[in-house]
Image: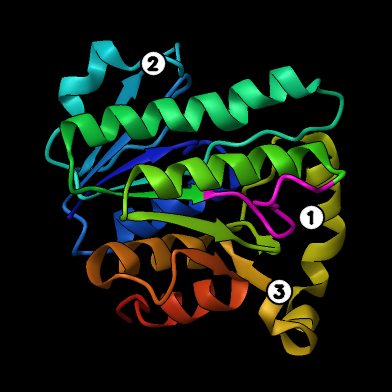
């Protein structure tokens, strides 16, 4: 299978990219971003692209792909709703429309998070915006999947770009084994996220809006070879 990854330099995206590079069934990985991943691999290709509201210039290069893992995100802290909406609604919708124009049968994966509100009633701005994004993507294609993880353990050696996220994960990472025992339905890892997306491209998923427990079940179906 051939996969596109957005946000491959972020905490979640690094896990998705690593899972793709490790999985023998993934033959080609295209990363689209503003900065290089700094990685080299025989099946990894990168496109530098600045305007995430318009992919016309590279749309032809999106043909022939089976799935797109959209892992690009930003914290809403300190942002106006208008600015947050550009990144969290306009960007993923532009990416999805460009992908589907070039690869109509491709699956599109959007990583939102626990608490995302599709009803538009939440008092939390980010939850409303991401909920609207989810709803629009679900209407756009029957192969759209929304991932709503709670606590995500990053790959070793990687950290979140947002400072308070990075601090949170430094504090919480040592507690990960305990969290997995007492609250397994709310704890996953960026590696499991990546594997669960690959498995869904391959075999589908039980539902189109997936919580942490669903993500972990799908990842378990695609354990890496020893």
**Residue at the location (32% across, 47% down)?**
141
Q: Could you tell whether 213 is left or right of 31 in the image?
A: right
> Depth-wise, is mark 1 or mark 2 nearer the camera?
2
Residue that mark 2 sits on: 49
Residue that mark 3 sits on: 186
Look at the magenta stretch and give its main secondary structure. loop
Residue that mark 1 sits on: 169
Q: Which residues are magenta?
A: 111-122
- Which badge, 1 or 2, comes first in the chain's sequence? 2
Quarter-wise, where is residue 164 in the image? top right
**Residue at the location (81% across, 20% down)?**
80
Residues under numbered marks 2 and 3 in contact, where contact means CB atoms less than 8 Å apart: no
Query: Visible in this render: residue 6?
Result: yes
Query: Visible in this render: residue 37?
Result: no
Q: Could you tell whether 102 is left or right of 93 in the image?
A: left
Q: CA distance from mark 2 to mark 3?
A: 34 Å
Q: CA distance from mark 1 to mark 3?
A: 15 Å
112 inside magenta stretch = yes
Q: Could you tell whether 107 is left or right of 34 in the image?
A: left
What kind of element bears circle 3?
A: helix
**Residue at the location (33% across, 30% down)?**
97
78 inside magenta stretch = no
Q: Which percent across, then down, holds residue 190?
A: 55, 59
Note whether 11 is above or below 93 in the view shown: below
């Amino acid at each position: 299978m051939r996969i596109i990854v957005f946000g491959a330099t972020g905490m979640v995206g690094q896990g998705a990219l690593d899972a793709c590079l490790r999985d023998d069934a993934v033959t080609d990985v295209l990363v689209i971003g503003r900065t290089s991943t700094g990685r080299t691999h025989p099946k990894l290709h990168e496109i530098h692209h600045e305007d995430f509201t318009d992919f016309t210039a590279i749309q032809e290069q999106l043909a022939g792909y089976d799935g797109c893992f959209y892992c690009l995100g930003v914290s809403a802290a300190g942002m106006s709703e208008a600015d947050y909406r550009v990144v969290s609604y306009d960007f993923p919708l532009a990416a999805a429309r460009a992908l589907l124009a070039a690869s109509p049968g491709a699956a599109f994966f959007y990583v939102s998070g626990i608490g995302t509100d599709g009803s538009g009633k939440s008092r939390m701005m980010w939850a409303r915006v991401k909920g609207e994004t989810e709803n629009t993507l679900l209407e756009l294609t029957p192969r759209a999947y929304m991932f709503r993880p709670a606590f995500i353990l990053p790959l070793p050696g990687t950290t979140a770009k947002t400072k308070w996220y990075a601090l949170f994960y430094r504090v919480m990472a040592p507690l990960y084994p305990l969290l997995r025992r007492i609250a397994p339905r709310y704890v996953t890892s960026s590696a499991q996220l990546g594997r669960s997306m690959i498995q869904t491209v391959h075999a589908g998923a039980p539902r189109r809006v997936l919580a942490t427990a669903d993500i972990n079940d799908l990842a378990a179906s695609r354990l890496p070879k020893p």
